[in-house]
Amino acid sequence: MPLKKICCIGAGYVGGPTCTVIAQKCPEVTITVVDLSQERIDQWNSDNLPIFEPGLDDIVKECRGRNLFFSTEVDKGIKEAELIFICVNTPTKNYGLGKGRAADLKYIESAARRIAEVANNSKIVVEKSTVPVKAAESITAILKANTKPNVKYQVLSNPEFLAEGTAVKDLMFPDRVLIGGEQTPEGQEAIQSLCWIYKHWVTEERIITMNTWSSELSKLAANAFLAQRISSINAMSAICEMTGADVNEVAHAVGTDSRIGNKFLQASVGFGGSCFQKDVLNMVYLCECLNLPEVAEYWQQVIKINEYQRRRFADRIIESLFNTVTNKKIAILGFAFKKDTGDTRESSAIHVGRYLMDEGANLRIYDPKVSRQQITRDLTDSEDPNKVRDLVTICDDPYQAALGTHALVVCTEWDEFKTLEYDRIYKSMLKPAFVFDGRLILDHEKLMSLGFQVITIGKRLQRPNVHRPYATAKGVQS
Ligand SMILES: NC(=O)c1ccc[n+]([C@@H]2O[C@H](COP(=O)([O-])OP(=O)(O)OC[C@H]3O[C@@H](n4cnc5c(N)ncnc54)[C@H](O)[C@@H]3O)[C@@H](O)[C@H]2O)c1
Ligand SMILES: O=c1ccn([C@@H]2O[C@H](COP(=O)(O)OP(=O)(O)O[C@H]3O[C@H](CO)[C@@H](O)[C@H](O)[C@H]3O)[C@@H](O)[C@H]2O)c(=O)[nH]1
């Protein structure tokens, strides 16, 4: 079923890269990515794209103006397209029913209503945003209730699995493409149209078709499983710190079991990003609505361990710095939620930074890709807007950040942090100089030989000069 025109509603981290790759792989198809935000669209049309993704700039340059367009003309984009991707945000609800757990579907609903309002011929509507099970049914209900004569809709679920920082690679070489649709001849025909797009570069075995609900649930399930692995290894890291086991060694031993596998077993200061917490909470809410409290509690625990890990790391910083960080200078290296992205949504650095600010610490923050404005926004306390001005300095390089500080705290695993001149940094810091490696990326032996007190996650390196090294342990002494 060849298609000529596609529209994508939402020019964000998913809509932008996904449509750029489709445009490159399907040069005969015209793709218009539309968004309500003029600023975002202007950035997509400039040399300064709104998101940083390795390899993305070159493909945008190749396709933009040829068969890839970015526009705020939402209605025009919808009218002209045969297939419409919905790639709008679905954040956790922060009000009303399901507050703090359910996904907020207001952007999905407004996109669906816009389609119903302006479409004057039949469309395939593809839900690419991550949504609760049965969202496609709601979209169908909105579309059908507002249908004009001779206009028919097929709604498909086609969740996206790209990870930030590797989006281009993930889109070019996906593990699988999932397409859910109605089990009717019309539904199957729509599925085949979308398959036609992906078959330009994805082999048939990797394109999995199924019913809509399975497809919607599979996306939530995949993220819940991934997040659960991180919480599992982080829970192990707490045990390692108490016992003298090394979490990297444990992860290696466990991961070599082919039934378990070695990916996503990197202990850390906790997972961040716009997806894991939101989607696990979404799953919790779904279970509560289905009257499955035991299942809800099981998934809620994944979030609890993540919060515990962040808090535990911040507490260890405070305890190691002689139980007070008030007026102490602390360098935060890395603010993005992972390397190779400028995205800070739900970044553990925000949580650790705020905990330390609550204790009166002065933060000197460096991240290679996160803007000053973003860091300021993320740390601003609405009840005390001056706090960030008084306590936070944003630095242009890691050496400037470390200057005159009591401690370095690594929150993001940027490669450049592995090869800094730590002897130079050591000399510029107050003594004793501490390093807190929240990502287990540094050469700890080397740092200790330079004179640093090194504290990391899931491994006991040395007994630092602290009052309560493992305050959470009941009766265990290191
Ligand atoms: N970020 C990721 O890595 C990732 C990966 C897979 C899936 N997802 C899912 O994809 C969805 C989008 O995520 P994102 O990170 O791209 O979000 P985002 O916030 O970066 O982008 C969403 C865009 O949609 C626009 N928008 C909202 N309502 C609109 C409307 N009615 N009309 C036009 N534009 C509208 C917003 O202005 C925004 O630019 C979410 O459901 C998310 O869970 C995200
Ligand atoms: O072993 C690991 C792996 C990851 N992380 C952290 O987990 C978070 C999420 O990382 P990652 O999954 O790589 O990035 P996301 O962009 O959030 O991607 C996830 O969320 C997307 C949105 O749904 C999905 O599409 C992807 O498949 C899924 O990996 C980051 O803070 C990582 O630092 C760890 O702490 N340890």
Image (spheres, rainbow, N blue to C red):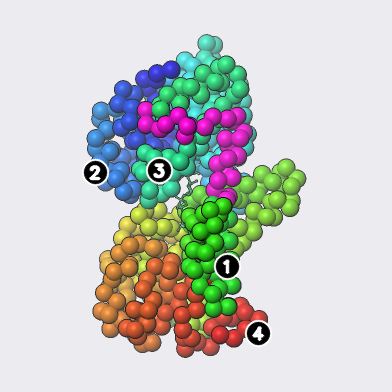
* Front residue of this view, candidates 30 and 204: 204
Label 2 with label 3: CB-CB less than 8 Å: no
Label 1 with label 2: CB-CB less than 8 Å: no
Q: Quadrant of residue 380?
A: bottom left
- List the residue tagged with mark 3: 170
Residue positioned 57% across, 44% down in the render: 220
Is disc 3 placed on a helix, strand or loop? helix
Q: Report the disc number at residue 475.
A: 4
Q: Nearer the viewer, mark 2 or mark 4?
A: 4
Q: Whole-Å distance between the Cαs marked 2 and 3?
A: 23 Å
Please state the extent of the stretch shown in magenta in the rendering: 200-225
Which residue type does callout 2 highlight?
A: Asp
- List the residue tagged with mark 1: 236
* Front residue of this view, candidates 357 and 295: 295
Q: Residue furthest top?
A: 150
Quarter holding the C terminus is bottom right
Which sits earlier in the primary sequence, circle 1 or circle 2? Answer: 2
Q: Whole-Å distance between the Cαs marked 4 and 1?
A: 19 Å
Residue 63 is left or right of residue 272, and the answer is: left
Quarter holding the N terminus is top left
Q: Whole-Å distance between the Cαs marked 1 and 2?
A: 44 Å
Q: Whole-Å distance between the Cαs marked 3 and 1?
A: 29 Å
From this view, report whether residue 400 is shown above or below residue 27.
below
Which sits earlier in the primary sequence, circle 4 or circle 1? Answer: 1
Q: Nearer the viewer, mark 1 or mark 2?
A: 1
Q: Quadrant of residue 437?
A: bottom left
- List the residue tagged with mark 2: 47
Is disc 4 placed on a helix, strand or loop? loop
Q: Whole-Å distance between the Cαs marked 3 and 4?
A: 47 Å
Which residue type does callout 3 highlight?
A: Asp
